[in-house]
Amino acid sequence: MAEVALWRMKGRRRAPLDRRLLVLAGLLIGAAASFISWGLPWSDGAPSAYILQLRATKLAGLICVGTAIGLATVLFQTLSNNRILTPSIMGFDALFLLMQSVLVMMFGLASMAQLSGFAGFLLNAGVMMVAALVLFTGLLRRTRGDIQLMILVGVVIAVLLRTLAVFLQRLMDPSAFAVVQTRMFAQFGSIDRGALLAAAGVTLLATLWLLRRAALLDVAALGRDQARSLGVRYDRLQMQLLCIIAALVSVSTALVGPIAFLGLLVTSLAHSLMQSHRHALLLPASALIAAIVLVAGQTLFERLLQLQSSLAIVIEFCGGLLFILLLMRGKLR
């Protein structure tokens, strides 16, 4: 009954769009315009169509990945009731690197080149999604919905996967290891258009589904017992959110590679900026901030500094420092 009441209240009274979200949207538009237009070569009085197309594809990939990671991290922190956890703790990045190592060991570099496009995206995303769903459903049933125990088991599995990946990399020849090493951090240089469309479709559907249920997410953040006492089907909602987290992290990782600490960085900024626990504000704020960080950072690296270093390395460094700072300050919730 309470769940129905929440839906009715949401339909009758909709809060106006927060000005801070409008500011973030404006910053993202400005960053996107700079990324597209800065240093764009012109030919015959018109911008180069080929360069413009490459930049547009990369821009769409940056926004898609940022949105997926921002949303997934907010949901995972809501379920775990912990502000320093991200979905990467469950071993998504470790599974991705293990898959790359296994593919190189079994099929060689030629097969890796063939699986670098849409086929590789489907394979990586499919395996990660299936593995995550098996882990979530199996552990939650055996632990009776204990999300904390599931996270602990996920940490152990992540360590095991990383150990196996390192072991396989020790057995590779230098050329094969160099190929796997390039997959250890997110790369935005060569994004397949078919894979981008698939990832964008999954991200868009997840975004619409979550925004329509923002009120239920606010109640779920109170905890299992409180949410169930208010009439929310918590177990069902929990499984739905875990499936969405698995889908978002899988498609973003399969599209560009692992980028673990981006979610922690942007959700912390979103909480500081919005000063609210309402998911109607946190979800879009986290998605916008993540997209701004990626687009503005890539613009800074490529256009202003003329560097070829990976943006993901800088983000991982800053996110790691923030993780240590949050631990020292005790801001876990």
Image (cartoon, rainbow, N blue to C red):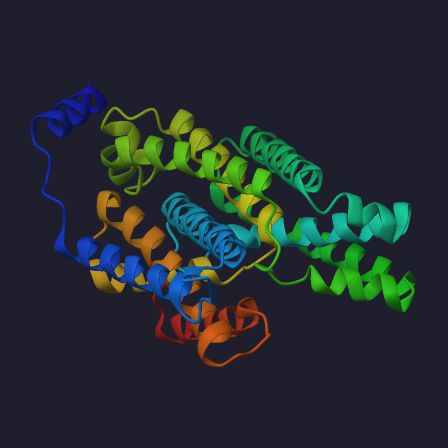
Say which residue appears at 39% left-offset and 44% top-offset.
Answer: 75
Residue 13: x and y in percent read: 7, 31
Q: Is residue 330 above or below residue 292?
A: below
Front residue (pair 328, 188):
188
Say which quadrant the C terminus sits in.
bottom left
Residue 28 placement, left or right of 260: left
Q: Is residue 7 visible?
A: yes
Q: Is residue 159 above or below residue 76?
A: below
Front residue (pair 9, 289):
289
Say which quadrant the N terminus sits in.
top left
Q: Is residue 91 visible?
A: no
Say which residue appears at 17% left-offset and 27% top-offset.
Answer: 6
Residue 113: x and y in percent read: 79, 49
Residue 38 placement, left or right of 261: left
Which quadrant of the figure has residue 164? Answer: bottom right
Residue 188 placement, left or right of 287: right
